[in-house]
Amino acid sequence: MTTAEHSCEVVVIGGGPAGSTSATMLARQGVRVLLLERERFPREHVGESLLPASIPVLEELGVLPAVEAAGFLKKWGATMVWGTDPAPWSWYFKETNQRNPHSYQVWRPQFDQLLLENSRAHGVDVREGHRVVEVLWESGKATGVRYRSDTGETATVRCRYVVDASGQTGILARDLNLRQWDSFFQNLAVYGYFSGAQRLPSPDETNIFIEAYPNGWLWSIPLHTGWTSVGAVVDSSTGQSEISKGGLGEFLQAQVAQAPHTSGMLREAQLESGPFIVKDWSYVCERVAGDGYVLAGDAACFVDPLFSSGVHLALMSGILSAAYVTSALKDAEIAEPAAAAYHELYLKEYSHFREMARLFYSSNLTSDSYFWEARRLLEGAGNFTPRQAFIQAVAGQPPRGYERAVLEQGKAPLEFASSVRQVESERERRRVRWEAARSGTDTGDPIMTAIPRLAPGTLTQRKPVLGAGEFVWGTVLTTVSQPEGTPCSGLIAALVSQIDGEKTVDQLLDGLISLGDESQADQIRQTALAALGILYVDGTVEELGGL
Ligand SMILES: Cc1cc2nc3c(=O)[nH]c(=O)nc-3n(C[C@H](O)[C@H](O)[C@H](O)COP(=O)(O)OP(=O)(O)OC[C@H]3O[C@@H](n4cnc5c(N)ncnc54)[C@H](O)[C@@H]3O)c2cc1C
């Protein structure tokens, strides 16, 4: 046995989707990364069904061609039996997302290995069969880890940052007592892999199928290997007591027997692997970044798998945690606000999925009512129909959140905000009023003498925003309808900060020109006026006095 001491810039604990994503993105920034994974890949893992929000991340990682070539089934949507409708109902991602209308049903041992090999190809020092046994601390700062390999080697590695992506093990959450358990979602899952399962009728044959039954709910996920992943999610304490009587196999069979659609699909099927049991308790950490450390993926939080959000959250937090570490390594001053920004972005996405799952668990509605409720929960969904608001919510948001999702639809954020909201009558009225004020008269453009007033609660804040691979200082516009804030340009920030309920539009535009480059006066005027129109239609500028 040998004991050694060495160093690197960042240690990543765990080579699942969160760890490999974080490591790859850090290596891209030129950071020296050591990734320690206790298993040897390919290793078994539950969680096969992905969301479209993961596609841009896989693209950014450079691994999408390999994922495509692996032959995983394309997942176009979901089919559910839930609530008072006894018949299955389906939705399709293409209803709200033209660019990424599908995701994949992946075989996790293969998928996770692709991502890990991609980290290696990016220069990450990946060591499989290496278990982190301890995180090292000095004056409250994480300064390294101690690990043991499956060949008996132990070593200490010193580093500037530790990324904890150890999944449900949650080494740092355990050390720092950060995990807050969610009393609402304390379930367990028993699952296995079947051959010969019948698939849903076309066009839904590659959808995830979810069926609620009196004890809980069952998933069926078709895989490209020909197998189907089938699992039952039930309340933890009732599940435990039933399992203790008859064992896992009998338990799974008894759950399937209570669900007529799933039983029909499994009539001719053979169990090939499993059954396995896994704890399915939701939790969130009260802090996801601190002195010398950051948490990503299941190490940071876990939400009930009803909407297949786990890998998406792992990939998203992999990107964001790497951005956080990159910025903190470069600029100590940005570390704390960037940690807050990371926490906020992460929690927002986590909470969407938690709220959606909570809605489904706590009510027995028709599908239409679920869509309406989804829309109510997601006030920022603009004027999507209730059904679209629901699909938008369960498809997930890529790491750049609102801005990124909008860019995927090929439009800039503010244009998108106005275009999706136009059909709402209030916004339509505002748009008509704005256009009337812009259509010049003999005496000039009447808008110029109007006096804009901001809606209460509107403010701009200097905050870290996600740039190319790191958090950078930027300006965020916070409004009543977007309380989490939308990154905005310096010009819009300057415009908003000058609106005081006294200056006319003409005076505001003159003020902006005097702040900038006078040779660009025409362009500044046009851009600022267009932005003002968008802010007015959007309600951020509540009133145009004097019109
Ligand atoms: C019942 C159930 C069903 C699910 N279904 C889905 C689904 O359909 N779709 C979906 O997207 N998600 C699903 N999930 C969630 C999903 O599986 C996880 O959210 C996802 O795997 C998280 O990725 P991660 O990288 O954070 O953690 P993991 O994938 O768990 O990776 C963590 C890695 O850390 C390693 N590790 C742990 N401790 C140490 C240590 N001390 N030293 C070194 N390495 C260590 C582990 O070996 C592991 O490889 C499901 C979860 C459950 C419980």
Image (spheres, rainbow, N blue to C red):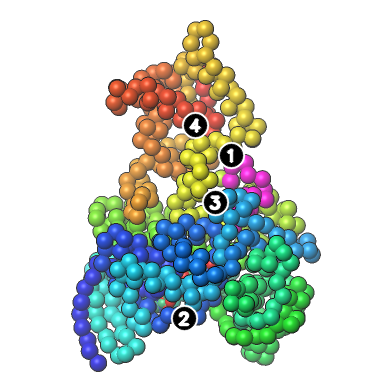
Image quarter (top left, top right, bottom left or bottom right) of the N terminus: bottom left
Q: Looking at numbered disc 3 in the image, what kind of residue is underneath it?
A: Arg
Which tag is nearer the camera, tag 1 or tag 3?
3
Residue under numbered circle 1: 420
Helix, strand or loop at label 3? It is: loop
Q: Looking at numbered disc 4 in the image, what kind of residue is underneath it?
A: Leu
Q: Residue at x 33, y 78 (%)?
A: 127
Taking the image as shown, residue 12 lies to the left or right of residue 263, namely: left
What separation in Å lies between label 2 and label 3 (alpha carbons)?
Answer: 32 Å
Taking the image as shown, residue 287 lies to the left or right of residue 85, namely: left
Q: Looking at numbered disc 1 in the image, what kind of residue is underneath it?
A: Val
What separation in Å lies between label 1 and label 3 (alpha carbons)?
Answer: 17 Å
Residue under numbered circle 2: 43
Q: Residue at x 62, y 27 (%)?
A: 429
How many residues crowd mark 1 within 10 Å: few (<14), some (14–19), many (20+)?
Answer: few
Residue under numbered circle 3: 99
Say if disc 1 is inside 8 Å of ligand 1. Answer: no
Q: Residue at x 38, y 54 (%)?
A: 340
Q: Are marks 2 and 4 in contact (CB under 8 Å)?
A: no
Residue 469 locus on image (x, y percent) = 34, 55
Q: Is residue 360 visible?
A: yes
Residue range (magenta): 381-394
